[in-house]
Amino acid sequence: MTKTPTDWQLPPGVTRSLWDYFQRDAIAEDYDAYFEHHALLQLDQRLVESVVEKTPALDGGPATLADLGCGTARALIPFVERGHQGLAIDLSWKMLGVARRKSKRLSGMQCLRANLVDLGAVKPGVVDVAFCLFSTLGMIRGSEHRAAALNEAFRILRPGGRLVVHVHNFWFNLYDPGGWRRTPLDVVRPLWNGSFERGDRYFYYRGVPNMFLHSFTAGELTRLTQQAGLVLEELIPLASTYDGPLRSPQFGASLRAIGWIVVARKPEAVPASESDHWRPGSLPVTAADLDATLATHPVTVIHFWASWNGVERPFDAELRPLREEWSDRVAFRSVDVDDPALAEFCRTCEVTNVPALAGFVRGQRVETLVGRRSTQDLRSWIERLAAQGQIPG
C-alpha cells in the first residue's frame, strides 16, 4: 500500500487530486475500456504514427520512443509490437502495473515510474520520438513545472528527435455551461489570486473531486515549446467533432479549436568543425577562478552551455543586448557543462538541461533558470537580481 503524503510532500507539479487519481485501482484497470472508442485518442495515435515514420533512428534500427505520462501504455504498445523500443513513463504504480501486464511478452518495452518534471533516470539524447498526449501536460500544476517537463523532454531527445504534445484549448472553455462568465474572469483572476494561473480548472472527474487541468492558448503552448529549445514544426488546431484537424483554421481557430497538437523538433547538433571553435559571448569561468569570480562581483549571472547544443547560439544572441545593457552592474560569465572540473558546481546549481542561467548575489545562488526565456522575462529576472544586490537599476 502506498503511503499517502501530506501536501508538502507531494511531488512537484502534482496536486492532491492527481495523486489520489493515481492510487485508484479501478481507474487503472478500467482505463483502456473507458477510452477505447474516444476519437481524440485515435487521432493522437494516427499523428504519432506519422511522426515516427518521418523520424527514423539514426543507426537505421528500431526507433526509441518515450510515452510521457503513458497511463497503461495504450499508445506505446502498438509501436513496440512492430519492433520499436519503448519507454513507458508515468508516476502511477497502478497504471504502470497494467502496462507491465499488457507488455510482459514484449522485450522492447521498459516501464519507469517518474515525475515528468524530473526525468533524471533517463540519459540525455537517447529518444527519437517522445509524446505527451491527451492533455497530460495540462495535469501538471504550475507554469514553472510545465516548463520543466518540456525542458526534460528536450534533454532526453536526440538532436533531430521530435516531440508530440496534445493539450486542451483555453478559449474553448467559453462553450462549457457558464463558460461565458467564468472564462473572462479566469483571465483576470491571477491579478488577485497569485496561486491561480489563466487556464487552471478544478472539476469532479471519475470519482475524484477537485481534479486539476490546465488548458492552453496557442500562444502559451508555442512559447513554452520554443523556450524549451524546440523548433516548432506544426501547431494543429483540433475540431470539436474529435475527428481530426479543424477545418478552415484561418477563421477563428483560437475560439473554435477544442485543443492543440504541437509537433516540435530538437535542433540538430552543431557540427564538430563549428562547435569546437564557438564559445558564448560571456567570459568563461574555470574551477580555479570560480570562487574569486563570485566573491568579486555583487551580482553574477552564469550561462551554463554545451557545444553540442544547437540552441546555444540563438540563446547567446538573445543574451547579447542584456550583457551590454547591464555590463556596468552585472558580471556575465559562462560555464561549459562538459568540463569535468565543474560537474559538481553544475549539480549544485541544479542545472538539469542547457541552456541555463544561474543568478548569484554576493556569492550566493538565488535562482537557476533552465531553458530559454523571452528577452523581456530575462530582463525582468536580471532586474530582480540587481535589486537584491542593492545595485540601482
Image (cartoon, grey):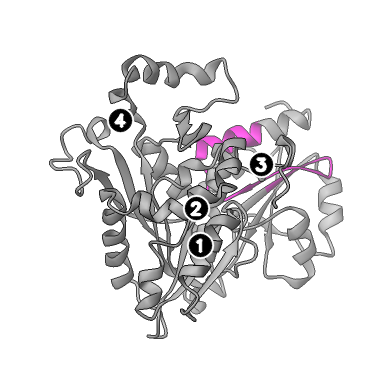
Numbered disc 2: secondary structure: helix
Residue 15 image point, x, y percent: 60, 37
Q: Are marks 1 and 4 in contact (CB under 8 Å)?
A: no
Distance Cα–Cα, label 1 vs label 3: 56 Å
Q: Which residue is mark 1?
A: 98
Classify 227 as above or below 215.
below
Mark linked to residue 167: none
Vertical placement of residue 190 versus 5, above or below: above
Q: Mark 1, residues whose alpha carbon is within 10 Å: few (<14), some, or many (≥20)?
A: many
Q: Which residue is mark 3?
A: 327
Identify which residue, 242 or 328, lies in the foreground. 242
Of residues 284 and 265, the one nearer the viewer is: 265
User: Are the two marked residues, 1 and 2, in contact with CB atoms closer than 8 angstroms?
Assistant: yes
The nearer-to-camera label among 4 and 2 is 2
C-alpha distance separating marks 3 and 4 = 45 Å
Amino acid type at circle 3 is: Ser
Which of the marked residues, 4 or 2, is nearer the chain's N terminus? Answer: 2
Q: Which residue is mark 4?
A: 172
Decide which of 62, 80 is in the foreground and name it.
80
Label 4 environment density (alpha carbons within 10 Å; few <14, some 14–19, many ≥20): many
**Which residue bears the numbered disc 2?**
28
- Give the mark toward the camera: 1 or 4: 1
Cα–Cα gap, marks 1 and 4: 33 Å
Q: Is residue 273 magenta?
A: no
Which numbered mark, 2 or 3, is in the foreground of this view? 2
Provide the residue span drawn in magenta.
358-383
- Earlier-in-chain disc, 2 versus 3: 2
Task: List x then y, in percent, for residue 210.
Answer: 53, 29
Q: Could one spot residue 317 in this view of the protein?
A: no
In the figure, is residue 2 to the left or right of 192? right
